[in-house]
Image: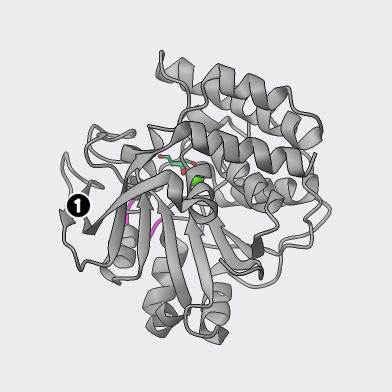
Amino acid sequence: MTDTPLPLIIDCDPGIDDAVMLIMAFLSPRLNVEAITTVAGNVPLAFTSRNARMVCERMGRADIPVHAGCPRPMARKMVTAEDFHGESGIAGMDVFDPKAPLAAGHAVNVLIDKLSASPKGGYTVIISGPMTNLATALIMAPHIAKGIRELVIMGGADTAGGNITPTAEFNIYADPHAAAIVFDAGLPTVVLALDATHQVRAEQARVDRIRALPGRNAALMADLLDAANRLELRWRPGMQVPMHDPSTVGWVLAPHLFQTKRCRVSVVTRPGKDFGRTRVKDGPRAPHRWVTVADADGFFALVEDLLKARA
Ligand code: RIB
Ligand code: CA
């Protein structure tokens, strides 16, 4: 990776783990978060958009434009996940009204404008929520694909099984038609599905190490992780919360912590027990890379290094 910070667009639905992901991205001097686009997902769009702006302000990055996007999935009825993120969508952080307003421009138009104006492969795009915004942008302006160096997606499940149904993971299940459009576009994509994120959990000892670090950023991250664990353990006793969305920034910053396999991912969009399920077909020349192994200790060492560097 060159010394020039990597141009990054993050499309998200904060969401506690989305917030942890954003904090990691803001702490790294190697990343240039040019824009945040928000989507309905964990909580309704008004809350995901407010929460993204809250994290930007709290981290001293109110300069980063936050553009609201699609307020509902493409075809299915909207589902949300307050059980795991709180009614605010960002349990662990006191809610306030961010000073910086939403940036002008619908997220879909901003994705089209930035990716169209980009040189070939100019942007890394992280999606950590339902893929409604990018799917809509790809339908409106298929040529924007040229502007994407790599798409890094948190979503899907194969061997791990689902977390919202026995076979489907939330981000895909919340808008399977959008996910199908994005995966079918054949973009160079790295997929951090539950198969990977379930290997990276916020065990209490790891959270305690973060809380012991100096500075407000470490305290905020520990508060978010403790809140996420409280909710996770209420609904899924026995296992600490997986680092779903933060694993995307982990990949971008430290791909050596992960192992992948080449494949083509498709999505079940027909109604039935497999609605929203991802199917993974291995193939050496396929466009997608499915993360199969994640180094949890290495990931949390990365998180600690980011927090120490910007205490
Ligand atoms: O299944 C986990 C995903 O769903 C994460 O992105 C979490 O934020 C929720 O959106
Ligand atoms: Ca998310």
Q: How many marks?
A: 1
Q: Residue at x 48, y 84 (%)?
A: 120
Q: Is residue 282 left or right of residue 256?
A: left
In percent of the image, x 68 and y 49: which residue is there?
50
Which span of residues is magenta-colored? 73-77
The figure's colour scheme reads one colour
Residue at (73, 32) in percent of width and height: 218
95 vs 289, left or right, is right
Q: Secondary structure at mark 1?
A: strand
Describe residue 280's horizontal placement relative to residue 170 as left or right.
left
List the residue tagged with mark 1. Answer: 280
- Residue 78 in sight here: yes
Residue 144: give x, y in percent of width and height: 44, 81
Q: Is residue 142 positioned above or below 46 on the image? A: below
Quarter holding the N terminus is bottom right
Q: Residue at x 55, y 39 (%)?
A: 17
Q: Position of residue 128 (x, y in %)?
A: 48, 51
Residue 205 x %, y %: 57, 17
* Callout 1 crowding tier (Cα within 10 Å): few <14, some 14–19, many ≥20: some
Name the one closer to the observer, 176 or 114: 114
Using residue 36 as the reference point, say whether residue 293 is left or right of it.
left
Q: The disc labelled 1 sits on which kind of residue?
A: Val
User: Which residue is more in the foreground, 132 or 221?
Assistant: 221
On the image, the x and y values in percent for residue 182 come to: 34, 65
Identify the image quadrant of residue 117.
bottom right
Is 40 one of the magenta-colored residues?
Answer: no
Residue 163 falls in image quadrant: top left
| Prevalent SS, magenta region | loop
Quarter placement of the C terminus = top right
Q: Residue 76 in magenta?
A: yes
Frontmost residue, 71 versus 252: 252
User: Residue at the top extreme?
Assistant: 238
